Image (spheres, grey):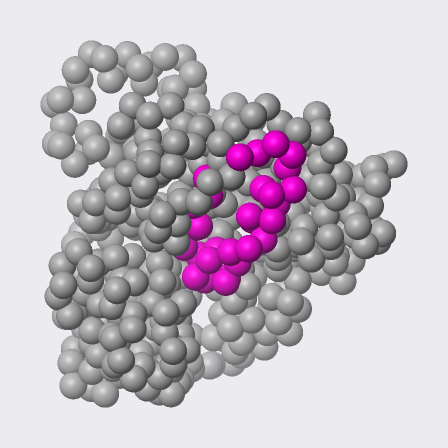
Amino acid sequence: MTHALFGLILTPVSYLKDLDYSVLQQCIHCGMCLPTCPTYMETKVERNSPRGRIALMRSIADGCLDPTPAFGEEMYFCIGCLACETACPAGVDYGRLFEMARAEAERSHALPSPGRKLLRGLLLDFLFRHQSLLRLAGRLLWIYQATGLQALVRSSGLLNLFPQSLRDLEAKTPVIERHFSPDLIAPEENPGSRRPPGDGRTYRVGLLTGCIQDLVYSHINRDTADVLLANGCTVVTPPGQGCCGSLHAHNGEYELSKDFARSLIDQFDLDRLDAIITNSAGCGSHLKHFDRLLHDDPHYAAKARFWSEKVRDISEWLVEIDFRPPEKPLPSARVTYHDACHLCHGQKITAQPRQLLAQIPDLDIVPLAESTWCCGSAGIYNLIQPDMAGKLLERKIGHIAATGATTVATANPGCLLQIQNGLAARGLNIEVVHPVSLLARAYHR
């Protein structure tokens, strides 16, 4: 259990041993998850499967196994795509087990590496903790790109002096937006005379702008605000909001993720909002579990429950309020849709994004084979497991190319960036876009 002292919440002695044992007992070892697990299907090794990993977790909870480096490596070899949850007939809460297992690996220092510790501290504990510093880093990177310095460095051959792993990492550097979300979206915007959605009501909603989304895809945040305004919603976007902590919760920094959750909750007046809107699948899956994350916090437990009740993915919210279909068509396009893992498996949202696309006149929507199979992004998985992520990406790009689509729609920043990089590497001129951006374009017409 979590231990308290003078009202303070302290780190558990062991995340797996202190976990409700019934969660560990849910797995019935039926094997239904095996064909849905990308790592198992690649290696056919039992420990690389969900039930194999759960067996390792349970051994630690039972005191039969210590958190060894092999345990830590296995937990970080898992993608965390949650496809096993969708397939599981017993309803195993693998997402919770996955987070606790990685937190256990970090708590026990199962992966001792000074370089790894320094990098995680710099990124997770320092840079992402302060949105102003993250934006400063983004601005410096934008200057590096916009001035042509990045292109010069790449063409000069200077990168050949560095190890292949660093060259591969540099090639994945995202293009930073010129303007971040606070420059594009006012703290409060009113729909004015715009018609309300089909249900006739008007709403007041909070908009989450994220961290990486804010730097790389701030235009998607602007598109999200425009779509909400077009459907009679007053949009409240606090400029001081930062990271939601999903990267931290998914990468073993469970206690740190609680700090981010508390800070984000404090940014919004929940009593005055009908919903909290997110357009990032990975973040949304985490945001909806603030109630579980802060259940033992005497000051935030009730707020977190209220928060979780209000969080909606943008597609989920628009369908819920019976959004207004655009009146004018977009230029003819052949569109296919990739299901972001944490939207389809984590939040069980599959129909709503497709409903958004189906309401845009003249779009030719074609199905994508294995649309729910992970593209290999998975937060920072493509950075820490580049070989496996690369195999998944090649598989995904092959299916996209086979559709003949001119546009790929997907609802997560990591997927957007991963698929963009994969298409560019193959020389395929296919646009990658968030579904809400296509809807915004149609409204603008």
Quick one: quadrant of the N terminus? bottom left
Horizontal side, residue 8 vs residue 64: left or right: right
Name the outermost residue toward the right.
193
Q: Is residue 424 visible?
A: yes
96 relative position to 299: left or right: left
Residue 140 visible in the displayed image: no
Residue 170 percent coordinates (x, y): 26, 30
Quarter of the figure with residue 100? bottom left
Quadrant in the picture for the C terminus:
top right
Question: Residue at point 25% right, 75% down?
Answer: 31
Residue depicted at x 43% and y 19%: 143
The one nearer the camera, 211 or 89, is: 89
Q: Position of residue 149 (x, y in %)?
A: 33, 14
Instruction: Please tell me which residue is depicted at 16% across the width and 77% down the height of the picture.
Output: 66
- Please say whether residue 345 is one of the residues in the magenta stretch: yes
- For residue 119, above or below residue 293: above
Q: Nearer the viewer, residue 363 or 110?
A: 363
Q: Residue 97 location in percent, x, y?
A: 34, 73
Q: Residue at x 55, y 48 (%)?
A: 354
Tally the numbered discs: 0
Tell me if residue 300 comes above or below residue 388 in the rendering.
Answer: below
Span colored in magenta: 336-364
Q: Quadrant of residue 276?
A: bottom right
Query: Relative to 142, is 133 above or below?
Result: below
In-image side of 188 versus 95 (left or right): right
- x%, y% of residue 387? 18, 45
In the image: residue 85, left or right of residue 295? left
Magenta residue check for 321: no
